[in-house]
Image (cartoon, helix red, strand yellow):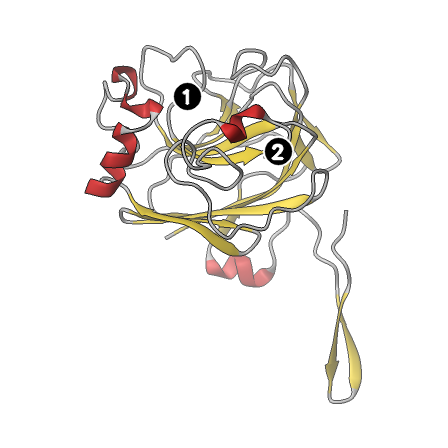
Amino acid sequence: MKSLLSITLLAGVLAFTAPVEPNTLTPAEKKDGWKLLFDGKTTNGWRGAYAKTFPQKGWSVDNGMLTIQQSDGSESHSFGDIVTDGEYSDFDLMFDFKLTEGANSGVKYFVVENYPKPAGSAFGLEFQVLDDDKHPDAKKGRDGNRTVGSLYDLIPAQSKQAHAIGDWNTGRVVSKGKHVDHYLNGTKVVSYDRGSDEFRKLVAMSKYNAPEYNTNGRFGEAPKGHILLQDHGNRVYYRNVKIKTL
């Protein structure tokens, strides 16, 4: 789907800016160092978490969208998460997502595939992707820290304006040094410092305090990691997934 044609008035003459196709970069973005993580046509650059190849079923490319089909609502059991081939430390990550009713997913970062493989999703910090009104996980956790845009199970998104189910939202994660910000539809909703005393206090109050999350180092403090899109058993759509190394 093309974005709306923009119209500006220059010296009394209407100037039309060509619509921007999804999953493309403008010349300015290319010059600024942005790279597409999803080209809108193939799954190049992605593979299954803890796997060498892309999942044979469940995930697909459909009309310029990377989508996971509906299954049983379980975490990473039916088809599995997918991760980028590359690993990142300082980055600016942007992605569009569209939820179906009652859906749950997530975009994780600083994902490290340590063994033994977890029973559920690969470990990493998570930008929550959720239907807050219809999925029960929104009521769990603490102070709303499992709602859309939140740092899952750690920090609730503040002052967010999520779009209606079936409409596109834009998520963004900016990580520089130890500092990380989440944005939802252009508004900063989460801000924190990995490894800080406050961060470790939050981890200690979360499910990530369990020993398995910290066997290979403190949770969420890896120096680099993969980007992950989560299979949580619900239909979700992604597009315009792009990253800039900072």
Q: Amino acid at mark 2?
A: Asp
Mark 2 Cα within 10 Å, few/some/many (few <14, many 20+)? many
Closer to the camera, 205 or 110?
205
- The residue singled out by tag 1 in the image is 122
- Classify residue 42 as left or right of residue 1: left
* Residue that lies at the very extreme toward the left in this rendered image: 197
- For the residues labelled 1 and 2, say whether their Cβ atoms are less than 8 Å apart: no
Measured as percent of width and height from the top left, residue 15 is found at 77, 76
Q: Secondary structure at mark 2?
A: loop
- Circle 1: element type: loop
Q: Is residue 196 visible from the viewing direction of this image?
A: no
Q: Is residue 13 visible?
A: yes
Q: Label 2, on which residue?
A: 131
The structure residue drawn at horizontal position 25% and vertical position 28%, both measured from the top left corner, is: 204
Residue name at image x 53 percent, y 17 percent: 80
| Residue 38 x, y percent position in the rendering | 59, 38
Residue 4: image location, x then y, percent: 77, 59
